[in-house]
Amino acid sequence: MAPSGKKRVERLAEVLKESRALRELCWRHLWMKAMMAAALEGSLNRNKAVSTKMVCVCEGEGAQIGRNMVPSFMTEQLAEVGVNEWRVQNRVVKELMKEEIWFEPMAVVLGKGIVKSAAWGLVARVIVGAVLSMTELVTDLFVLWQYWKGVQKILKFRNASLASLTTSLVLQLILVVGQNRKKGVRRTLKEMAYVITGMKPAVDAYGVASGAEKEKDTELDPMLEMTFSKGIEMFSESIPGIIIQTSAIISYLNSGVTVLMTPYLSQAVSVLTTGYVVYFIGGDMMFYLVMKAVRGDFRY
């Protein structure tokens, strides 16, 4: 599981012993340790700007400055921009970055780690990803049904959509069979049922968000399994879906046929899902692999 806020604070004491520069900074500014500890807790708090000069900051204000770090990262996609917002809102941070050139890059790395490993951040990302995946499946099935009936009956788009969904389904089934082949027939059939019913994204999201670890006799831990599953979904369903729906819409417009809203909706959901998987799940995976290399016991 991800390190809790309490464990991150405990780790601060070890870091202070290892880092001479940070240790000296804490000696010069008594509020510095309180600021770092509050930031490392990674709790969601209301952002309250602190304009006090560095020489006048008390321990309570230092803690508030630390608590302001997470809200700054929550409103920005790039860590560097989040750090800049933290600096603008808190005079002390700005002065620290002028005084110590290493403090800003340290804050960027620190902020990335806090947001990536905080439970609330991961839960939000995996839940949104699961909702997008399930919504995409529903819209794809509805569009496929429309291709089969009425004015939307265009065989090449129907066949392409069917091939895309079938490929995604088969690859997902292969993944769960490989993952659970040593867990017995009952477990394998249950996981296959999740795939067939479209519940697999929700099941994966629950496993990752709840901090589940790799089970005995399975090949992948929950984070890796979810990442592979999302990759299959993206390359065999989302990206082909974008191409298919775009081609269908262009074909309808050229032929003068009225285009229903569902192809547009399906296309939009596929675009959102693809972007989400690449940006967030891919980012989580990179962070996971780096931490796995540094610490073999790392878990989300």
Image: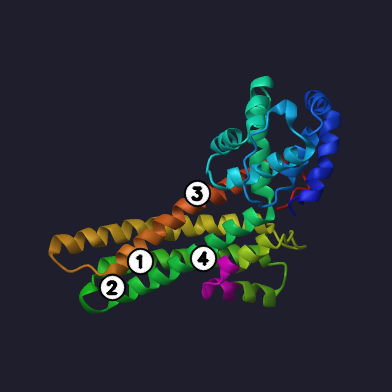
Mark nearer the N terminus (4 vs 2): 4
Question: Which of the two marks, 1 or 4, is nearer to us in this view?
Answer: 4
Q: Is residue 95 visible?
A: yes
Secondary structure under tag 2 reads: helix
Q: Name the residue under label 2.
A: 147
Q: What main secondary structure does the magenta stretch of the protein show? A: helix
* Label 3 crowd bin: few (<14), some (14–19), many (20+), radius 10 Å: some
Mark nearer the N terminus (3 vs 4): 4
Question: Which of the two marks, 4 or 2, is nearer to us in this view?
Answer: 4
Q: How far apart are marks 4 and 2 (CA)?
A: 24 Å
Q: Quick check: 234 left or right of 149? A: right
Count the marks: 4
Which mark is drawn over residue 269? none
Secondary structure under tag 3 reads: helix
**Which percent across, then down, holds residue 130?**
54, 64
Q: Tell me which residue sits at (55%, 71%) in the image.
A: 195
On the image, which quarter does residue 271 sit in? bottom left
Question: Hey, what amino acid is under mark 3?
Answer: Val
Q: Distance between the residues labelled 1 and 4?
A: 21 Å
Secondary structure under tag 1 reads: helix
Q: Name the residue under label 4.
A: 131
* Labels 2 & 1 near each other (Cβ < 8 A): yes
Q: How is the image coloured?
A: rainbow
**Which percent across, then down, holds residue 95?**
65, 25
Q: What stretch is highlighted in magenta?
A: 192-202
**Which percent across, then down, holds residue 84?**
56, 33
Question: Hey, what amino acid is under mark 1?
Answer: Ser
